[in-house]
Amino acid sequence: MNIFLVEDSTSIRRLLVRRLEAMPGMRVVGEAAGQQQAFGLIRWTSPDVVLMDLSLASGSGLSLVRELRQSGYAGRIAVLTCEDYDAYRRACLDAGADAFYDKASGLETLFGDLLELLPEADAAEEEKPVAVLRDGLTGLYGASALCERLGEAARAATYDGVDLAVYVLRLAGLAELPADISDALALQVADRLREASGEADIVARSATDQFAFVLAHLDQAGQAAAHAQHLGALMTRPFHTAGREYTLALALGMAVFPADAVSPRGLLTLAEATAFGAL
């Protein structure tokens, strides 16, 4: 079950992510603190469940419920709030919410209700193929290993009291080139990203034209933007293969832990959606 969290408190998001991802069958696929960003990311991820607070960094949960239903979102919407229960419950349900929970006393009820919504696992789900940990061409981490390593890096950052930044780089046109040219350029992209990485940083390739870079240690928030500019400069330099020069258009998305998201998929979702122009 894919779950999207809309909550402006980092500490509460951290608590919810920890509990949800410890439950079998639950996966947090995205996070947002404000209405506009949440709406764009929910349309991007199409989660099974949206779990939201009413009080947001910008906009409101009640307006978001209405906006989601008017846009055709058919998943389950659950409101979890400290606002006056009786005053807001009816307004949320009338706007299209499926459930309403009090933060002080309703968490266990929420988790129990989510478990009851899980579909029965079938044989096909139980026999999923083993995830490929490395990209066969570049040797970089694949999508599955990226998420796992990012989780480890986030835990280390929390322990050390620092932030980290996640970048998704989309190289337009790479997938449309002849296979031999595309492969040669992808190897050069991988080499440039490796050269830009430190010992604790993570470099991955999650699709033919999509790479990820995790800057594992941020002492100051401004470092994230500065490193984005550095990555952009690396990728806009021409590539050369078979006696020809190639320039690839770069779209770059960024997310910062823990300010933007605390879950690995939440960080990747925000960076990816930004790179693809979904926000």
Image (cartoon, rainbow, N blue to C red):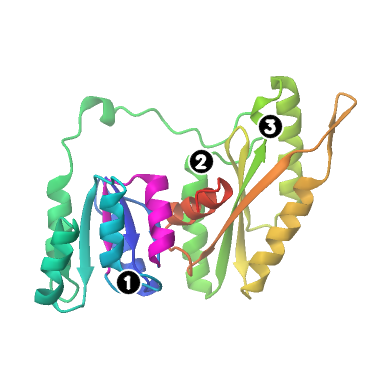
Kindly report the distance in space between the C-alpha atoms of the residues bearing marks 3 and 1: 40 Å
Residue found at x 39% / y 27%:
129
Quadrant, the N terminus: top left
> Does the rendering let one see residue 106?
no
Q: Amino acid at mark 3?
A: Leu
Q: Label 1, on which residue?
A: 12
Residue found at x 33% / y 55%:
4
Q: Amino acid at mark 1?
A: Ile
Foreground of the two, 145 or 163: 163
Label 1, secondary structure: give it. Answer: helix
Binning the other alpha carbons within 10 Å of mark 1 as few (below 14), some (14 to 19) or many (20 upward) gives few
Q: Which mark is residue 174?
A: 3
> Does the rendering let one see residue 6?
yes
The image quadrant that residue 5 belongs to is bottom left
Judge depth for marks 2 and 3 and give the one in front. Answer: 3
Q: Amino acid at mark 2?
A: Ala
Residue found at x 62% / y 70%:
218
Q: Is residue 56 left or right of residue 226?
A: left
Kindly report the distance in space between the C-alpha atoms of the residues bearing marks 2 and 1: 27 Å
Q: Label 2, on which residue?
A: 143
Binning the other alpha carbons within 10 Å of mark 2 as few (below 14), some (14 to 19) or many (20 upward) gives some
Above or below for 260 versus 166 = below
Judge depth for marks 3 and 1 and give the one in front. Answer: 3
Label 3, secondary structure: give it. Answer: helix
Q: Is residue 235 left or right of residue 115?
A: right
Judge depth for marks 2 and 1 and give the one in front. Answer: 1
The image quadrant that residue 98 belongs to is bottom left
Q: Which residues make up the magenta segment?
A: 34-53
Q: Earlier in the sequence, mark 3 or mark 1?
A: 1
